[in-house]
Amino acid sequence: DTGVSQDPRHKITKRGQNVTFRCDPISEHNRLYWYRQTLGQGPEFLTYFQNEAQLEKSRLLSDRFSAERPKGSFSTLEIQRTEQGDSAMYLCASSSPGQGAGELFFGEGSRLTVL
Amino acid sequence: QKEVEQNSGPLSVPEGAIASLNCTYSDRGSQSFFWYRQYSGKSPELIMFIYSNGDKEDGRFTAQLNKASQYVSLLIRDSQPSDSATYLCAVNMNRDDKIIFGKGTRLHILP
């Protein structure tokens, strides 16, 4: 399977715990995006990378959220001290630059439930 | 003002009719525009992109772009029940390809 893969698919945690999600993009794609989506809303931009460089992090994102892409391949999104409001689907997508930019290929998402 | 705005719907259209979905964006410098379809419980998938003013047709789908009015639309001809989904408008906001989505329009095709 050469698509975008995300792990875990589902995560249930208690308030205050830390969680980490992993995304493996399509191998030849150097851009990687993280979005958060709640019911009835569109994907909300969180952050994105070109190779290992983080280009931008949403101003709406608290310091509890951090993302890395250490070798320009897979990426991790960590949420520290989770809150109930963090419950959402976390979507990862990848793309190639230039003409392919904006043509995002999404993974199946990681659903977070904070109790 | 939100960066990408869409009417959340639901938009109900009889089978076989034309469905018209609209989107406006705030950044006049945006250069590329996308329509994604998202079925319930699934991830978004790209169905159309448009870079130039005017119309772009692909099968039953036509994307329309008017940069002067900062307006993008998607027409679906001969609507089918399988077209029932949420349609997300996305805009490439800058040279570094930051992609912002609208909240989506729920489309329901009535059999």
Image (spheres, helix red, strand yellow):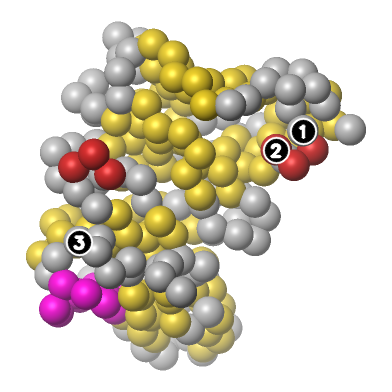
The residue lying at 79 percent from left, 38 percent from top is B81
> How dense is the environment of label 1, judged by Cα within 10 Å: few (below 14), some, or many (20 and up)?
some
For residue B18, side relative to residue A31 (left or right): right
The label on residue A50 is none
Residue at image mark 3: A30
- Number of numbered callouts drawn: 3
Chain of the residue under the numbered disc 1 shown in the image: B
In the image, residue A35 lies at what x, y percent? 38, 59
The C terminus of chain B: image quadrant: top right
Residue at image mark 2: B83
> How dense is the environment of label 2, judged by Cα within 10 Å: few (below 14), some, or many (20 and up)?
some
Q: Which residues are magenta?
A: A65-77
State yes or no: discs 1 and 2 in contact (Cβ < 8 Å). Answer: yes
State whether residue B2 appears in this view: no
In the image, residue B43 lies at what x, y percent? 54, 58
Callout 3 amino acid: Asn
Chain of the residue under the numbered disc 3 shown in the image: A
Frontmost residue, B73 versus A59: B73
Residue at image mark 1: B80
The residue lying at 41 percent from left, 42 percent from top is B101
- Real-space Cα distance between discs 3 and 2? 32 Å
Callout 2 amino acid: Asp
Callout 1 amino acid: Gln
Instruction: Have a look at marks 3 and 1 and say if they share a chain.
Output: no
